[in-house]
Image (spheres, rainbow, N blue to C red):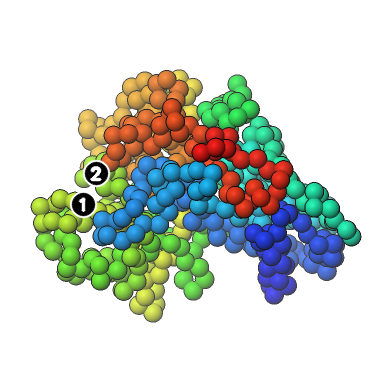
């Protein structure tokens, strides 16, 4: 394990921001024959790749959710400064105001996956075919996942798919990498995810935990990739006629293989991390790693005796049993999102704790409690809730979206989600959804996704991918925003903000790179 730690640390140094090369590896490391010679070493390296992935949990929120119109920005309901307010949550990006730098650190992670693929595909003869295929299914799935993150954020990005070695004197130009076109990146992502699918074959097993990549994770990602490709045009990447059906074919084998838990809050229970709804999750454990759930909560000093509960009483006793940890409220969701839930919807207070500035329920605020963790044996609250990447509710709502785009009735999938949400209070007259045509269906699916996936890094992607009656992304529709009569982005002046600008330092380090279209002059 010590040797693995040294290797990963060395690779991390190679991709630090001070380097101008994305994947340069030294000759002595590239040919390190003393490492890739035991199954335990290979499996430990794969665990390291998943540790890499877990470390992107904030990026999962920032790239996939914070921009999506459900997060407050500026000042919280408790007068604390909110993180990522500008330019992320308010979408005030310019070429000089990017917040995110160096491709958000993804190329260091891609380098390590590339290294794994190189060694396992071309060596490691001690592995059985079954072991090799499963490991490569994982590796190609992880690389597709990273590039899909980059693609949805920046469109065309540098395409690094191999580990390269430079011997002796290296000219600076050998270190430069231009941005590939969006189509080249999407074609590569599709190639990788199909390779992953092929390596897994019919093996749907989990290797000990649902926090490790699996065939099911690959099929969920494949569904997302082809659904995105079917609905979102980026530069020279336009939908192919078969993309939508490919997405459906990828998702179909998962239907019924997993199940919804009856109790929504149980999905995030520390003691039931391997529950039947989880397909793939980022794993957090007491005394091992914690998440950033505390940033959506608060400290008693700025909360108790200062705000009111729903019943109109001043909150004087800690209602969430925080044990002195948490906050001070660095991320907060808009109150309009909280109000969009019916009071009988079990997700409402399994997701949020609401409070008010006055005793008559005016000026409401929310604390997000899905990541609140648990009280450990030392009587300390630990933020060790897993963050789901894929769960069965996502599969059902993606299938609803696919069927809607195909012109079919999506209501059966929507209603499975609603039945779980309302439980014993579910009423066929009040809660059952009936097919209402493409645009209304699309909004209904979005609303269910909004209620299901708070904090799970999906909302921005949803409003970019989903459409109104005119085929325009819902990010341009005021119906998809909360607490604001305006759309998240203005179609006439902000369409270029579907993609992010590249920070100045990254551009300066590589003259082959070009700025994202639309940010050249603003």
Q: Residues within 10 Å of mark 2 (few under 14, many from 20)?
A: few
Determine whether the residue tagged by mark 2 lies in a helix, strand or loop: helix
Residue located at (11% from left, 61% from top): 313
Q: Identify the residue under disc 2.
A: 339
Query: In the rendered image of this protein, does residue 370 appear above or below residue 141?
Result: below
Give the residue pinned by disc 1: 364
On the image, the x and y values in percent for residue 187 come to 68, 34
Q: Quadrant of residue 452?
A: top left
> Foreground: 16 or 344?
16
Q: Is residue 83 left or right of residue 192?
A: left
Tell which circle, 2 or 1, labels the residue nearer the N-terminal end.
Answer: 2
Question: Cα distance, mark 2 to mark 1?
Answer: 10 Å
Residue 144: mark: none
Tags 2 and 1 in contact by the CB under 8 Å rule? yes
Q: Residue at x 40, y 21 (%)?
A: 469
Of residues 70 and 492, the one nearer the viewer is 492
What SS does tag 1 mark? strand
């Amino acid at each position: 394990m010590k040797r693995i730690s040294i290797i990963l640390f060395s690779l991390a140094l190679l991709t630090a921001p001070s380097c101008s090369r994305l994947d340069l590896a030294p000759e002595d490391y590239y040919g390190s024959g003393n490492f890739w010679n035991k199954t335990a070493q290979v499996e430990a390296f794969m665990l390291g790749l998943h540790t890499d992935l877990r470390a992107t949990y904030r990026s999962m929120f920032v790239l996939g959710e914070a921009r999506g119109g459900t997060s407050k920005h500026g000042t919280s309901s408790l007068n604390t400064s909110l993180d990522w307010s500008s330019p992320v949550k308010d979408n005030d990006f310019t070429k000089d105001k990017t917040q995110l730098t160096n491709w958000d650190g993804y190329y260091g992670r891609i380098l390590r996956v590339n290294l794994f693929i190189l060694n396992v595909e071309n060596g490691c003869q001690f592995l059985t075919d079954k072991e090799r295929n499963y490991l490569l299914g994982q590796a190609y799935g992880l690389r597709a996942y990273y590039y899909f993150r980059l693609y949805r954020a920046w469109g065309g990005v540098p395409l690094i798919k191999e580990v390269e070695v430079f011997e002796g004197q290296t000219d600076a130009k050998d270190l430069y990498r231009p941005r590939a076109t969006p189509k080249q990146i999407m074609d590569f992502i599709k190639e990788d995810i199909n390779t992953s699918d092929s390596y897994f074959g019919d093996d749907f097993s989990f290797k000990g935990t649902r926090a490790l990549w699996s065939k099911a994770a690959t099929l969920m990602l494949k569904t997302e990739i082809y659904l995105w490709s079917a609905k979102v045009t980026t530069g020279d990447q336009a939908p192919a006629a078969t993309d939508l059906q490919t997405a459906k074919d990828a998702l179909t084998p998962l239907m019924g293989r997993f199940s919804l838990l009856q109790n929504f809050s149980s999905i995030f229970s520390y003691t039931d991390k391997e529950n039947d709804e989880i397909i793939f999750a980022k794993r957090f454990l007491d005394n091992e790693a914690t998440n950033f759930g505390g940033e959506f909560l608060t400290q008693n000093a700025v909360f108790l005796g200062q705000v009111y509960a729903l019943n109109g009483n001043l909150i004087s006793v800690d209602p969430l049993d925080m044990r002195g940890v948490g906050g001070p409220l660095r991320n907060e969701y808009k109150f309009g999102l909280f109000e969009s839930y019916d009071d009988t919807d079990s997700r409402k207070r399994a997701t949020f704790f609401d409070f008010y500035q006055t005793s008559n329920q005016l000026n409401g605020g929310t604390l997000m409690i899905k990541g609140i963790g648990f009280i450990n044996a030392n009587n300390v609250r630990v933020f060790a809730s897993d963050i789901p990447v894929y769960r069965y509710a996502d599969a059902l709502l993606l299938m609803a979206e696919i069927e809607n785009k195909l012109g079919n009735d999506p209501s059966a999938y929507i209603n499975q989600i609603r039945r779980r949400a309302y439980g014993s209070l579910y009423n066929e007259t009040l809660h059952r959804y009936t097919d209402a045509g493409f645009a209304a269906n699309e909004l209904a699916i979005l609303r269910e996704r909004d209620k299901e996936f708070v904090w799970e890094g999906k909302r921005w992607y949803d409003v970019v991918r989903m459409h109104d009656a005119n085929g325009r992304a819902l990010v341009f529709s005021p119906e998809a925003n909360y607490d604001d009569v305006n759309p998240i982005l203005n179609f006439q002046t902000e369409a270029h903000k579907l993609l992010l600008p590249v920070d100045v330092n990254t551009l300066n380090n590589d003259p082959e790179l070009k700025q994202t279209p639309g940010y050249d002059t603003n």
